[in-house]
Amino acid sequence: MRGNNKYLEKVTEETDVYRRHLLYEEKLTPTQQLVFDKVNVARGWLKNGYSDSQVLDLLRKDPATGLQERRAREVLAIAYDLYADIRLTRNPDGIKLLYAEIFREAAWLAYEEAKTAFDEKDRKGGSELMKTYRALMAEAAELDGAYVEKTKDLSQKKKSSTVTIKRKSKIVNGQIQDEITQEAKVTVEK
């Protein structure tokens, strides 16, 4: 059991290194950079819809990664831990966010193609691609919930509570003695 704890500590420490790299742009050693690149490859495969077992298989067999089984599992765990959007795919809201990201990427590609078409004086092709861009972005926005009006449900609001701390100080034989009592009053409204 003790060996498993050390193994988990090792993976957690490694994940922290990559998280600091993402958040604070800390430099990675060449070895860490190679592993980080493999984590990004695994993330890309997950984002493209591959299952965990498929990604593990690809991490082992792909010439770009070529990892052993145990290391492939570690890289997959790090990919899940580093990128919250992938972890959210375990629930329906996460799947929506993932599809929205895919729509945004496709929209960006359409936009780049439209710019190229306009540069080449192909106004009709550029216009069609801009329509595609707008449709893809609208779909992404809808999946992200941009058009959903959120109403505040006041019944779910936290109930108010009151905490009172009373302090009594007495001087006995030239020494100060404090008596602290704490009362908590919780108001529940139905």
Image (spheres, rainbow, N blue to C red):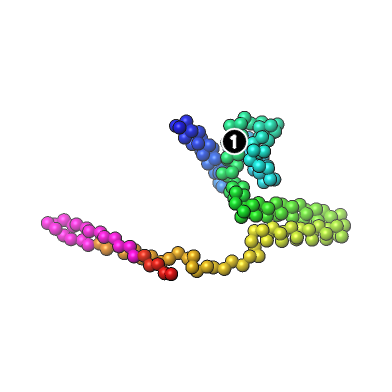
- Horizontal side of residue 44 vs 6, given as left or right: right
Residue stretch in magenta: 168-185
- Horizontal side of residue 170 vs 154, given as left or right: left
Quarter occupied by the C terminus: bottom left
| Three-letter amino acid code of the residue under disc 1 | Arg
Residue situated in front as seen by the camera: 174 or 86 = 86
At 70% across and 51% down in the image, what residue appears?
102
Quarter occupied by the N terminus: top left
Could you tell me residue 129's position as x and y percent?
A: 81, 57
Q: Is residue 183 magenta?
A: yes
Could you tell me residue 131's position as x and y percent?
A: 79, 61
Figure quadrant of residue 29: top right
Could you tell me residue 150's position as x and y percent?
A: 59, 66
Is residue 137 depicted above or below 75 in this figure?
below
At 78% across and 58% down in the image, what residue appears?
132
Residue to which mark 1 is pinned: 73
Crowd around label 1: few <14 · some 14–19 · many ≥20 (10 Å): some
At 70% across and 54% down in the image, what residue appears?
104
Figure quadrant of residue 166: bottom left
The answer to whether residue 143 is seen in the rendering is: yes
